[in-house]
Image: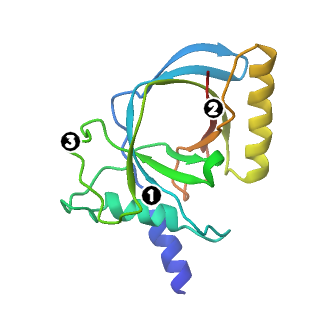
Amino acid sequence: MKKVFFIFFLSCAFIYSQESSKTYTVLKKIGKIEIREYKQLLYASYLDDEPTAESSSSFRVLANYIFGYNKKNEEISMTSPVVIRLFNNNEMLFRMPDKYTFKNIPQPNNKDVKLIKAEAVKKAVIQYTGYSNTLIEKQKIKELSTILDENNIQYNNQFELFVYDPPYKFFNRKNEISVNLD
């Protein structure tokens, strides 16, 4: 019963804002992929040192931070997508709303939550629907890599998963695999 309540809590907690400002511009479309230019962004990041298949501690830790467990006890709107760095042991990142900078962002109470600035960058992105899993992610990485290789587009092999929807949304789910371009 305790586990069911916790899963329900996490589902309810995954409410995010759709900010009016777009974080990227589409530069080009090549088949199923988009080449995008992302503006500089600020993230809260957490890397679980001991991840397990049933672990949801990354989400829980970052959710605590945005729900007010920070030096200002300030609630921060959740934005979409949640970023998972597949190349870095599934490090999870929440994008901070545009109103925040390093100067005004509430500092985390948890020393393991890091605030990081991602510089402006070009990315190649492939979109897919449904729930994501390791097998699908590997297929989409291969598909994205093949299209980039066929078009002689250089990339850095540091793939990320973008998850746009809360876990309780069953239909029309949006996910993307991205990689930075050289």
Q: Mark 1 points at which residue?
A: 14
Residue 180: quarter of image? top right
Identified by mark 3, the residue type is Lys
Which of the two residues, 134 or 156, is positioned nearer the viewer here? 156
Q: Does residue 157 sit above or below 161 in this rendering?
A: above
Q: Position of residue 114 (x, y in %)?
A: 39, 53
In this picture, residue 50 sits left or right of residue 58:
right
Circle 3 residues within 10 Å: few <14, some 14–19, many ≥20: few
Q: Mark 2 points at which residue?
A: 179
Identified by mark 1, the residue type is Phe
Q: Does residue 154 sit above or below 55 in this rendering?
A: above
Tell me whether the residue at label 1 lies in contact with that at label 3, contact meaning CB atoms closer than 8 angstroms: no
Circle 1 residues within 10 Å: few <14, some 14–19, many ≥20: some
Q: Mark 3 points at which residue?
A: 103
Q: Does residue 99 sit above or below 5 in this rendering?
A: above
In this picture, residue 15 sits left or right of residue 144:
left
Q: Does residue 20 sit above or below 52 in this rendering?
A: above
Quadrant of the frame with the C terminus = top right
In this picture, residue 45 sits left or right of residue 28:
left
Circle 2 residues within 10 Å: few <14, some 14–19, many ≥20: many
Quadrant of the frame with the N terminus = bottom right
Q: Residue at 69% x, 34% y: name it.
A: 157
Identified by mark 2, the residue type is Val
